[in-house]
Amino acid sequence: MTEPTLDDVKTAARRAGWTLSEAEAAKVLKGALRGRRMADLLRTYVTPDTEPAGRFVMPNASEASAATRTDSSRSSE
Amino acid sequence: MTNVDPLSLTIVELATAYRRRELSPVDVTEAAFQRIEAVDGRLNSFVTVTQELATSQARIAQDELARGVDRGPLHGVPVALKDLYATKSIRTTAHSRVLLDWIPDEDATAAGKLYEAGAVMLGKLAMHEFAYGGPSFDSAFPPARNPWNPEHITGGSSSGSGAALAARLCFGALGSDTGGSIRNPANLCGIVGLKPTYGLVSRHGVVPLSWSLDHCGPMARTVEDCAILLQAIAGHDPADPASASVPIPDYRAGLQGSARGLRLGVPRSWFDEGEGTDAEVLQAFEEALRVLRDAGAITVEVDGTVFAEARAANMTILVAEAYAYHEENLKIRPQDYGSSVLARIRDGALLSAADYIQAQRARSVIVRRIGEMFGDVDAIVSPAGPRVAAAFEGYDPDVTYKTPSYTNVFNLTGMPAVSIPCGFGASGLPIGLQIAGRAFDEPTVLRLAHIYQQATDWHTRAPGLS
């Protein structure tokens, strides 16, 4: 991915509702460049079938599954 | 006991002295406040002292012990909390002007558990603002200073916790750890800090930095004291969505036993990452391995690549989640943040949703690879940090990106890791050893660390404050 520029920082700042001085924008850019490099590096660790670790799981899914099994066993009696 | 400074005792020794009536909670608490008054002006480890509360708790503990009501080894023991644990009716600031007026109406779960165990709360401890950023001179309070040399940093973000314990101002403390914030100050201040398994200790009532990486845990001067503190605070809490419902073993009992046959993975190729690890740190580490081998452990080389890769995933997740938490305040009151934390959190606005998801995907790969490694070893050992504590003067906030970050990988995997003292550098500043283990295998991590402490005396040394 392309590296962020000072203009990108100013655009992001406007979108986020910040008022940045030039010095502050330069400081954010330094962190943003580092962040970009890290985020690009991450893309080399994953393969197409890698699921996110923070995937969504239905609350109480295990209990629901157990209940379904119980219902099935009853209906087959 | 009459000639011994009570503040130099461990929690275990203090508990014994109470039960032998050689010392009393009221006297020890008073001694702690006298020492805080005498030395903390140079260290800034406390941001709030709670003398009235502590005195009242100490009196109650003393009365209960006299009546034979024994709440266990923390009964009457003076402790303190990193100032991001909510404390009912006591200001909780996260070291920031943003929360300078926040007086919570309930205690964090872990704080409440310490109270139930009879601990005496001396006050709230300094930290890096919002548990992020670095040592800063423009936050709500001055930065904590290292008791081994106040011109040097403590490490963070649980900076006050590390300083107060090393300076013998309290007997135990709670910290929080998102990328190393318990283990870094433990390492640089020469004390013990345990980041437990993700979900083992409730984070309810603790100001978050990054929800999927935040851990709460104990800090003390010995491994056994850490085990006692962990026993008090571990356990399922429905108020924390990430809280694990697992059996809680007897951590102190688990310290007994041998290291014989335990396999320790040593990821040496990691130690050279970036600018590498200082020779004096590596020397202390190799000597620590020798001690553990003498105790019966077996050291084996493991591939260090995956550990070095973890930093990018950890930092991306941390920054993105921290930005999400602070988004509104960054817009409406940026002037209330210190410059260090402000710059770091703002980085999150430049990350995309895809960046965050890629980090979580990478995380699952890293967790799996390190999990597989634990099929062959019982623990992973490394230095706790690449260098001894830096001086404030000329401090480079970006140094963490230039050298191996030994701690944050275990926030990413959620696995338990402890930092214990394993020597001193030429400058007289402490060096630490990190031992990490399988998820919920705190007993093995603590046992190895305890065995090391039984064979060495680094943890008994105190800085020359007077």
Image (cartoon, coloured by chain):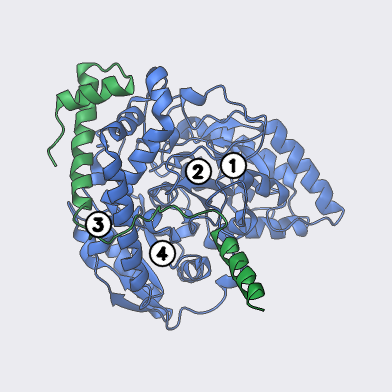
Mark 3 or 1, which is nearer the eye? Answer: 3
Residue B309 bears which disc, if any? Answer: 3
Q: Which of marks 1 and 2 is nearer the N terminus?
A: 1
Residues at marks 2 and 3 on the same chain:
yes
B465 or B260: which is nearer to us? B260
B286 or B325: which is nearer to us? B325
Mark 1 or 4, which is nearer the eye? Answer: 4
Q: Can residue B49 be seen in this view?
A: yes
Mark 2 or 3, which is nearer the eye? Answer: 3
Q: Earlier in the sequence, mark 2 or mark 3?
A: 2
Tell me what hue chain B is rendered in: blue
Secondary structure of the residue carrying numbered label 3: helix
Task: Look at the numbered discs 1 and 2 and tell me whether their residues touch, using CB distance below 8 Å.
Answer: yes
Q: Which of marks 4 and 3 is nearer the N terminus?
A: 3
B241 or B297: which is nearer to us? B241
Q: Which chain carries label 3?
A: B
Residue under numbered circle 1? B80
Residue under numbered circle 4? B436
Instruction: Give, as a three-letter code, the residue at label 4.
Output: Ala
